[in-house]
Image (tube, rainbow, N blue to C red):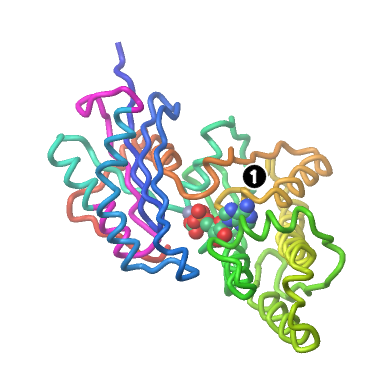
Amino acid sequence: MQSDSIILGIESSCDDTSAAVLINGKVCSNITANQDVHRKFGGVVPELASRAHQSNIIPVIDQAIKTAGIENQQISAIAVTQGPGLMGSLIVGLNTAKSLSLGWSIPLIGVNHLQAHVAALFIDHQVEFPMLCLLVSGGHTQLIWAESFTHTEIIGETIDDAVGEAFDKASKLMGLGYPGGPIISKLASTGNAKRFQFNDSQVGPYDFSFSGVKTSLLYFLRDEKAKNPEFIEQNLNDICASYEISLIQMLIKRFKNAIKDKKPKSISIAGGVSANSALRSAVMELSAKYNLPAYIPDFQYCTDNAAMIAKAGQFLLEAEKFISYDALPYSRS
Ligand code: KG4
Ligand code: ZN
């Protein structure tokens, strides 16, 4: 009888320490420790992130294993984020995974964090290929053409900021806190999205640019505040709704261009910004318009999590793609 495939996933590329156990493709635990320490700085402080990972990582792994109800010796492979991400944060995760792999004599798999965001789609969906995926996170905005999980091509990407950054920077500008995406999205839900206009950039057809829209928000707020110092507080929901819809339309316009030209069999979104309700609705509209299945990750698999690392690990285990103990983390993709 074939033994179970049990994968321990470990993620520590940015500010979330996460561990998950996947048994025969099914997520049996997914434990994440968020780091509140960055909140007062309005963004992730790399040195503080590494230190918090160092104190969180063993308890998080321990809890993931206990919640799944397995013993260490049953684990078939340890899958860990190797990059891209913050170097200090990656080092903590990778070195912990190496130690466990060595101590428990379990093979080690290095996972690309971006590929893992796409792998998150496979947790709950039977994917039809070729798939066109819009990957939207705090560090990346890409249109990915996928013939299979391992055969992918980036057909478009941002030439400057990522869309998650455009949310985070706008939030900082308005003094709303970090991470900005969920805060802006919540405020936007009761605002009038047609009230203010923020212009799209000229890049395309599949590439993105978000630095211009962020700057236009900056100047808009500066000019309005000069006339009325209370402008932001008095119009917060409408500003957030108008800014959010501009970002979503910029994404959808390129997504549509690629759907029309490339004719995929399915479409999907992945990454932290795929938790955004307005984006999720817009993608469902595209799905109906072009009569294509759309895969949208469950909320727990949108932002950084180890279940997606374990899922990517499953494919790499099937392909027998292991890494050795001298493998290094990489900060850029
Ligand atoms: O994928 P992720 O957790 O980390 C990276 O790999 O970067 O993405 C984090 C990004 C942040 O920029 C955050 O503001 C954004 O995802 N985000 C959202 C929402 N939830 C998280 N943006 C818009 N709406 C949301 N609901
Ligand atoms: Zn991520």
With respect to residue 320, does 171 lie above or below? below
Identity, as a three-letter code, of the amino acid under mark 1: Ser
- The quadrant in which residue 293 appears is top right
How far across and how far down the image is residue 135, in percent?
A: 58, 54
* Left or right of residue 113: residue 88: left
* Left or right of residue 314: residue 107: left
* Figure quarter occupied by ligand 1: bottom right
Q: Which residue is mark 1?
A: 268
- Which residue is at a point 73% across and 80% down the rendered structure image? 221
* Left or right of residue 213: residue 3: left
- Which residue is at a point 68% across and 44% down the rendered structure image? 267
How far across and how far down the image is residue 183, in percent?
A: 62, 58
* Left or right of residue 17: residue 172: right
Which of the image's four quarters has the N terminus?
top left
Residue 298 is a magenta residue: no
- Identity of the residue furthest to the top in this view: 1
Q: Is residue 136 visible?
A: no
- Identity of the residue furthest to the right in this view: 194
Q: Which residues are magenta?
A: 67-94
Viewer-nearest residue: 75 or 171: 171
- Which residue is at a point 45% across and 71% down the rendered structure image? 41
Residue 84 is a magenta residue: yes
